Image (tube, helix red, strand yellow):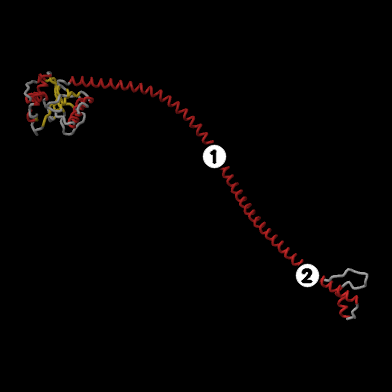
Amino acid sequence: MSVQRTPTKYSSNPDLTAENAVRFASRKRKQPEDSVCEQIERLSEKLLEKMNTWKSEMDTGISSINNIIDSVIRSELDTLSTRTLGMQGELNKLNANYDKLGSTISKLQVCQTKILKDIQDLKDSMEYQSNLQCDLQKRVCELESANKTFIKTEENVHNLNIQVGQLKNEINMYQQRERMLNLEIIGVPEIKNECLKDLTVKVAQHAGVVITKDNIEHANRVQPRQIVQGRPRTIVIKLKSRLHKDNIISGLRGTRGLKTKDVGIPGEDRRIYVNEHLTVNNKLLLKKVKDKAKTKLYKFVWVKNCQIFVRRNENSPALLMRNDTDITKIS
């Protein structure tokens, strides 16, 4: 860099470098003013060097300052860039969350629509249930009314059942009274042209009782409720005297039993049973009494005057069995 001297009134070259070059080239004789000039030139050179040094230092300082400023700016820019990237990431997250929030809101709207529909359905169902409850209450009232009628009817039916039971007992008693003179003979084989009255006279003779055909009201075979193949029909004998019937029953109990050969019936010898003629209900009652007595180890069950009796042993009192309720006495 060239340094120019401030112009003076002298006609010297302002360019010191060129002047020095000329001066050294010409090698003129030194004059007093030349010494001053030389000093001025040296001073100028020193100043020039100093200025160049300052300039270099200033350039170095400025460069260092520029580097520092660049470094600071770059650091700040990097920080700002990092922050910007962070903000961009946060912004992206916010955008993603916003998208999710939008999706969630859409789902919530769908759920809300469904909930509203469910609420409406629930309202409809509650209304239906309310109507149904009203109908049920109405039906309950009707049923309560019908139940009162039913209870009254049930009481009437119960009373009727009692009356029917009483009527059945009375009918059974009446039927049994009608059979008080009857004997029931079981196990006699059926023979063509048989005479049942003659058979009855022979049965009485075996029991030690003397009767004639005139003492017999009628004698006939009866058809059983259930027909068993090979089993003869039962013979029912009605006597004119209850005394004859009781004597025949008691007389047969003293024998070893009655068989077909005892009454003159040919063929295989079979056992014959002679009993009092019980009604169907009394026969069923007799079977129940025998079964219960067997279970409870009662020794005696018998029929006398068409009535059923039971006794635990020889020292126990006899119990009269008139109906199913009396069977509970067997314990």
| Residue pictured at 55% horizontal, 42% vertical | 111
Q: Rate crowding at label 2 as few (under 14), some (14 to 19) or many (20 or more) other CA atoms within 10 Å.
A: few
Q: Is residue 247 visible?
A: yes
Where does residue 322 sit, x and y in percent of width and height?
20, 23
Where does residue 296 sit, x and y in percent of width and height?
18, 31
Quarter of the figure with residue 213: top left
The kind of secondary structure element at disc 2 is: helix
Q: Is residue 89 above or below residue 284?
A: below
Quarter of the figure with residue 233: top left
What label sits on residue 38 in the rendered view? none
Q: Nearer the viewer, residue 142 or 177?
A: 142
Q: Quadrant of the C terminus?
A: top left
Amino acid at pointer 2: Thr
What label sits on residue 53 in the rendered view? 2
Q: Quadrant of the N terminus?
A: bottom right
Amino acid at pointer 1: Ile
* Image-based side of 221 in relation to 45, left or right: left
| Residue pictured at 28% horizontal, 21% vertical | 162
Q: Nearer the viewer, residue 50 or 302?
A: 50
Quarter of the figure with residue 285: top left
Q: Is residue 2 above or below residue 270?
A: below
Q: First in sequence: mark 2 or mark 1? A: 2
Q: Nearer the viewer, residue 57 or 109?
A: 57
Q: Is residue 219 visible?
A: no
Residue furthest out toward the front: 32
The kind of secondary structure element at disc 1 is: helix
| Residue pictured at 24% horizontal, 22% vertical | 168
Q: Is residue 105 above or below residue 248?
A: below
Where does residue 204 sit, x and y in percent of width and height?
8, 24
Judging by the rendered image, the residue that carries numbered circle 1 is: 115
